[in-house]
Amino acid sequence: MIHLLDQTPDQLQAWLAGHGVPGYRARQVWQWVYARGADDFDQMTDLPGVVRQRLAADFQIWSTRVAAHRKADDGAEKLLLELADGQRIECVLLRDDRGHCTICVSTQVGCAMGCAFCASGLDGLIRNLSTGEILEQMLRLRQCLADGERISHVVVMGMGEPLANLDALLPALAMASRPDGLGIGARRITISTVGLPAGIRRLAGLNLQYHLAVSLHAADDPLRDRLVPANRKTGIAAVLAAADEYFEQTGRRVTFEYVLLKDVNDGPAHARALAALLRGRPALVNLIPFNPVAELPFRSPLSPDVMRFAETLREAGIAVKLRYRKGDEIDAACGQLRLQEETAAG
């Protein structure tokens, strides 16, 4: 069976044409999937029965099953999805007090980047996700919404390194941002990366207006090499140069994410070094207190230390945003639920 969500609009139209079906029927199919949330082809009642039968014979809308669904008191929801080959990935829905519904999706099963504080890469990279598997996470999370809610933002910040799977990710985001897709504007989509300069430059050259977030986590190479092993091949200077190019090409301010780890990178000297590194750049620093993971040795920073770190940056003229933790009780940190379920099964 072909995963319907792996098909581009042109590919589906070509398949229909090959079966003697007018091309406008493709628009109807996408409307049923993206606007009406159809689960199967029988629900597409404005398509002739024979067309529905042909579609059902060759295509499947869903390729995953929900292996676990966790809900937190703060409105966060996390899905553990089992893929057709038995592998598992995570995706998350986050609600805020402004009525925004942000979804966080994965791009790979596992991760090769090996960030020291992240559960996603503990077992390494298994494989890339397909375009359809990325889109299906968005549709699965949309099913969690209540009446009157809609997806407001997409962050590609789940399992995996997005820039290592751009060939599958870019078509998924293109469909998500189409009016006949999920209708989420490009400026409400964020791609997060550990900082792969070649991938950042490729994205900059396309000028797609997605927001770029670079996971920095340290202001010097020795510490970043320890926390983000991929840095050993690039170095902070190359990452920043690529980020600067992204801003020059797109006009979009780059966000630098910084996970605060108690007694590792959360001290006053670390804050001053980060301020010096970013001074003069049109950047936003997103400070993220570490979300505890039982299998990892790091601890969450103390609240006063977080406030002091943020104030040091602000005094240096750096824009700062504090990301308050959500979903602690549902293991919302990247890779936690998958790791927990696999440990229990083993």
Image (cartoon, rainbow, N blue to C red):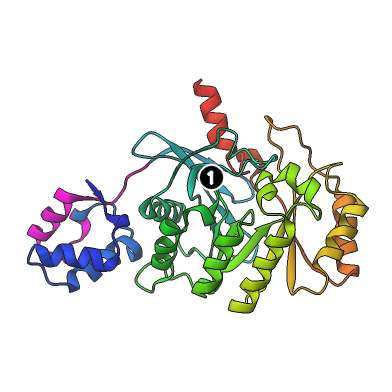
Q: Is residue 193 above or below residue 123?
A: below
Residue 78 in the figure: left or right of residue 11: right
Residue 341 in the figure: left or right of residue 306: left
State the residue at coordinates (54%, 74%). 209
Can residue 290 be seen at all in this image of the molecule?
no
State the residue at coordinates (49%, 73%). 206
Judging depth in this view, the residue of 142 and 13 nearest the camera is 13
The quarter holding residue 48 reads bottom left
Q: Is residue 43 magenta?
A: yes
Residue 132 in percent (x, y) is at 36, 53
Judging depth in this view, the residue of 342 and 43 nearest the camera is 342
Residue 9 in percent (x, y) is at 28, 67
State the residue at coordinates (69%, 30%). 294
Residue 344 in percent (x, y) is at 54, 23
Q: Which residue is mark 1?
A: 78
Q: Is residue 38 magenta?
A: no
Can residue 242 be seen at all in this image of the molecule?
yes
The quarter holding residue 298 reads top right
Residue 222 in the figure: left or right of residue 48: right
Residue range of the region highlighted in magenta in the rendering? 42-64
Residue 165 in percent (x, y) is at 47, 53
State the residue at coordinates (67%, 54%). 234
The quarter holding residue 18 reads bottom left
Q: Amino acid at mark 1?
A: Lys
